Amino acid sequence: MKDRILALATAVFMTAALLVGGGQSAFAAGSPADVNGSITVGIASDLDSSLDPHVSSSLAGTREVLFNIYEGLVKPDTQGNLVPAVAESYAVNDTADEYTFTLREGVRFHNGNEVTVGDVVYSLTRAAGLETGEPLMATLAGISAVEAPDDRTVVVTLSAPDAEFIAYMTAAVIPEGSDPADGIIGTGPFKYVSRSVQENIVLERFDDYWGEPAKSARVTFKVIEDGQTMVMSLRSGAIDMAAHLEASQVAELSGLSVLEGSMNLVQALYLNNARAPFDDIRVRQALCYAVDKQMVIDLAGDGHGTALGSSMYPAFGKYFDDALTDYYEFNIARAQELLTEAGYSAAKPLEFTIDVVAAYTPHVNTAQAVVELLRQTGMVNAKIEQMENSAWYSDVYQGRDFEATLHGMDASTLTASALLARFESSNAKNFIGFDNADYDAAYAAALATTDDAEQTAKFKECETILTESAANVYIQDLADFVVTQPNVQGYQFYPLYVMDMSTVYKTA
Amino acid sequence: MQYVLKKTGVLVVTLLLISLLAFLAFQIIPADPVTKLLGTDYTPERAEALRHEMGLDRNVFVRYFDWLTGFVTGDMGDSYSYGMGVEKVLEGKGAVTAGLSLMAWLMVIAISVPLGITLARFQGGRLDRVFVAMNQVFMAIPPFFLGILFTYVFGLVLKLFVPGGFISPRESFWGFLGYLFFPALAIAIPKAAMVTKLLRSSILNQMQMDYVRTAYSRGNSRWGVLRFHVLRNAILPVVTFVAMTLADIVAGSIIVEQVFALPGLGRLLLASIGNRDYPVVQCIVVIIAFIVVFMNYLADVLTQYIDPRVRLG
């Protein structure tokens, strides 16, 4: 018995020794792809609902898997452009309220049938809820009619002009009359094979795909909720790759390929603008001055992450304004001054609670760093309350019963609206209760115009207002690590939260 | 007969109470299924409409009764978060948890019975002294920690299994059992330490009794006394404990399933609580409660079988 313990202890120390030394990138380039290859991907959360592309779009983890199965009339590419998919081309009228699509010939569903205008009309009618009056996808609520004048053309009419509307046409096309609850049929590079709750989702290459065929024959998404187990599974080779890892997890891995991209979300200390103490702009600005973003990124993410100054991240290109990033340059004296003006002092410090979802470790770590930095002012006493995901939704997001929360907001479509709409005063998603007439005006102007340059300028104006009025304490776009076995190649990052498996392959 | 009826009655009442309590517990914690389903697409109107559609706006007791009627007639309802029937969601999950628990339970017996007897037989010997010293440690190690340790040592260093490489019984039954070996051992060790300790002290206790002296005086060897006289008496409290351990093991597997990425009932239960997926939670709770109550009942029967002095009635 004693000997066994000793052996065990030795083994543990040996393991510890092996663990030292971080992950390095070991990229063997240029080997041919194994066309019969099978890739197993670890995902941190199970998919929700019935895999209905028009319904389940609210969960980012589901969206990124469905991206491989379903396609819309257009789809995003890695550069953030929208490229034609089921449609071959499209045109917009001058008033931006009528979009005309020409279907691509020879696009097939996974059941073998060719896509017809009837399928497209059915899909958009269903997603926009034209018959029920209840849109399944909130982004499509602006559609007033979908018609097919001939057998290759679909015309979508909007009730109000929207120059960004084309980005919403990534909505999935499904066969006419079908219900995804009865069978998952799309037009994407992979077709659905099977699913076992909490275990896996299996996809297979669709050989009749209209575009570049997928490089691997089979992809299995394996559900592994526990972060430590995910790391073990990568080390043991049980999975070929995993995305959305954190710096601390990557540090435990060696001999695997590590790719660094960004999560494409706006991580911030979101403040409840509608309620004391954050209804006072001086208090909000004080926090902005007191939080040194680079320090937070160094403390919480080992220096990986991109500092942000407003509700926009760099992957959006033209909408991103880097000048806002350092609008509030770290300045403790200024923060103390503003806090004093607002009536706080060392004897009567500002006290508030930061709500964080416990399962999102990067947010928890960031919150801890923020609390520490705020403490340096000598006038702020923030405490962290960790909560469960469902409770966060009900109390913070939907109930708006919070003071501050550290969270990340992502974009489900490639539009500035996806990030900026929520700060319009009457928007249902405006959980921070931001109410600014200039913002509402600028946002409305941006939506109304069809001139791209003017629209971009108006959206930037929105971002500037958010920064100047210190709506939130903006922090960063988190680093996103994708770790793969050395023989897995071809992964590409998108400016959206998706995981495109069609380019990923194992070397033969 | 009367005994069986009475016990069955107790079983039914217990299950009813537990399922009702589980149902009521969801009324106390924040959020409901609609919260999670709508997520960031939430608007009060959509939430209201969805609640109405799902029947969540009705009185909690009405809903409970509804669920109960369905359950009794074999309709377990539909899962809210997976959009399919509960029986479909549970498919295969029970086999994983049952396999894991049974294997761990058999390990507990296989380790502790021979070990307990041997230790008592050689009381005060070297092995016994080491065991007594180490026992506290083994009893105190939580299974999830052993799980992490095993993953490193047996999985990554010695490569005896592939951590995270669960094999479903549909693919390969033996591969499935093979993968369950280390998770089961992680659950079994602390329990085995307890049972060994209990058995050892129970035997040593009996050895002080008068009948043992009598047995010796009749010329029995130490082994003979142990085997034919002491063991029958000593094993009584142990049997009850071992039977109850199975219930404990089923509950304990929840965490271990997480560590070894096993798609079992425990992991599903945790996720479903997070999703506020009542139909799934209710079903799993009833299954686990049934196992606990049933094992208790089995322990009673076994006790009677081993010791006829215990009258059941």
Image: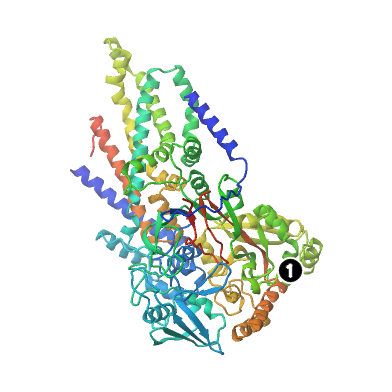
| Residue B245 location, quadrant | top left
Relative depth, front residue between B70 and A236:
A236
| Residue indicated by mark 1 | A285
Relative depth, front residue between B138 and B293:
B138
Relative depth, front residue between A4 and A323:
A323
**Chain of the residue under the numbered disc 1 shown in the image:** A
Total residue callouts? 1
* Colour setup of the view: rainbow
In the rendered structure, the answer to whether residue B145 lies left or right of residue A416 reads: left
Q: Is residue B63 above or below residue A438?
A: above
Bin the neighbour count of mark 1 within 10 Å (Cα to Cα): few under 14, some 14-19, many 20 and up. Answer: many
Residue B250 locus on image (x, y percent): 37, 44
Residue A269 locus on image (x, y percent): 65, 64
Asked if residue A121 shows in the view, the reply is yes
Residue A96 locus on image (x, y percent): 55, 87
| Residue B104 location, quadrant | top left
Residue in the picture at 58% in, 45% down: A252
Residue A247 locus on image (x, y percent): 61, 52
Residue in the picture at 35% in, 19% down: B207
- The kind of residue tagged 1 is Gln
Q: Is residue B241 above or below residue A4?
A: below
Asked if residue B244 shows in the view, the reply is no
Mark 1, secondary structure of its residue:
helix
